[in-house]
Image: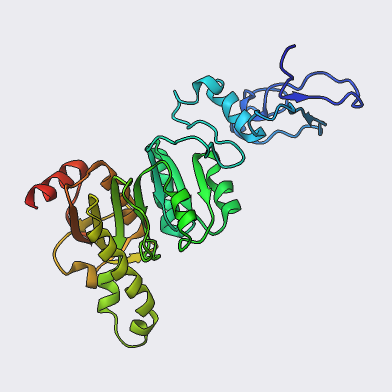
């Protein structure tokens, strides 16, 4: 039996001619447009009634993903275009052993967490994210991200979160490593820490940052003691400013007094995935005057310095 059409007119709707090309694809000189009207100008059309026909097959993708498949040339071409395989609605095949090829992003619904996720999508990574609001994150990133909601103090949850994970990116001091967790299967950790910022704060701000400071200290201690190849990026104060407009500064002490765009910090976290040190590499960073065009070469130089 042939597959049902993506769109079909209900039987109760009156018969009428098939609609013409989409308004955005009409030539500017058609009878619906004026000769000098831009190609993308809207065209008034009488409203048409359509019904979406969806198969009842439980293995079918969602409507949005079927549209994506149609645009990309069909489900078989998803990998060609860089789109990942669709995840089942129940969160994935957790009863089978996953290949360790995923990147876990903690605090994935934070502003910088979302920037990290977007950069990972562009790198075509398989992504798992710890979030507080699963629905909004899924609406933002769709099937490109496996969203997980739970208590990081629950060992069974962290075990589930780390299943199939090769690398962990912690873009905020959220205390992910504060409680003992089994990291033996993880191959690489990238920790973005603002410990230097917290230590340099004073007065009321120091009181406000006291809890964050303890979480940051604990996270760094656990990562250092784990023996897993890691990057601890001690960033300057994170700013909501456009990234890519300034260079960087890596001088000692710059994290305590400098500033850095969240976009730039997220970029460094993702670029660090391609550089795995033998033990742990710690460096400070803020926006400055040094241009870095090849992060892989830059990380290799820092690792060679030891």
Q: Position of residue 209 (x, y in %)?
A: 36, 78
| Identity of the residue drawn at 35% across and 79% down | 210
Which residue is more in the foreground, 26 or 289? 289
Which residue is more in the foreground, 79 or 36? 79
Residue extending farthest to the bottom is 203
Q: Position of residue 290 (x, y in %)?
A: 17, 54
Q: Is residue 99 left or right of residue 296?
A: right
Residue 293 visible: no
Which residue is more in the foreground, 186 or 189? 186
Quadrant in the rendering for residue 119? top left
Q: Is residue 263 above or below residue 61?
A: below
Q: Is residue 33 above or below residue 155?
A: above
Residue 166 visible: yes
Quadrant in the rendering for residue 280? bottom left
Q: Is residue 91 left or right of residue 285?
A: right
Q: How many marks?
A: 0
Quadrant in the rendering for residue 91? top right
Q: Position of residue 180 (x, y in %)?
A: 36, 62
Q: Is residue 178 left or right of residue 139?
A: left
Q: Position of residue 56 (x, y in %)?
A: 75, 28
Split into 4 quadrants, where in the image is the N terminus? top right
| Identity of the residue drawn at 7% across and 51% down | 305
């Amino acid at each position: 039996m042939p597959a049902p059409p993506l769109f079909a007119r209900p039987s109760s709707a009156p018969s009428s001619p098939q609609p013409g090309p989409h308004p955005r694809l009409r030539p500017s000189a058609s009878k619906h447009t004026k000769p000098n009207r831009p190609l993308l100008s809207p065209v008034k059309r009488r409203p048409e009634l359509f019904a979406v026909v969806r198969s009842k097959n439980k293995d079918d993708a969602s409507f949005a993903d079927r549209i994506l498949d149609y645009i990309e040339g069909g489900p078989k071409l998803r990998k060609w275009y860089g789109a990942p395989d669709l995840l089942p609605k129940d969160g994935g095949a957790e009863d089978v052993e996953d290949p360790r090829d995923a990147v876990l992003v903690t605090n994935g619904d934070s502003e910088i967490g979302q920037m990290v996720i977007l950069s990972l999508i562009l790198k075509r990574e398989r992504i798992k994210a710890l979030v507080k609001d699963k629905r909004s994150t899924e609406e933002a990133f769709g099937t490109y991200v496996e969203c997980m909601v739970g208590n990081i103090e629950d060992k069974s949850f962290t075990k589930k979160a780390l299943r199939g994970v090769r690398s962990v990116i912690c873009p905020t001091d959220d205390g992910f490593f504060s409680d003992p967790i089994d990291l033996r299967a993880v191959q690489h950790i990238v920790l973005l820490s603002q410990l230097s910022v917290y230590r340099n704060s004073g007065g009321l701000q120091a009181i406000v940052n006291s809890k964050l400071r303890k979480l940051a200290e604990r996270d760094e201690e656990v990562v250092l003691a784990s023996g897993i190849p890691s990057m601890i990026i001690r960033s300057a104060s994170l700013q909501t400013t456009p990234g890519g407009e300034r260079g960087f500064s890596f001088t000692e002490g710059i994290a305590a007094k400098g500033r850095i765009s969240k976009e730039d910090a997220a970029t460094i976290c993702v670029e660090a995935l391609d550089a795995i040190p033998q033990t742990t590499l710690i460096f400070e960073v803020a926006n400055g005057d040094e241009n870095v065009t090849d992060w892989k070469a830059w990380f290799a130089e820092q690792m060679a310095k030891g």
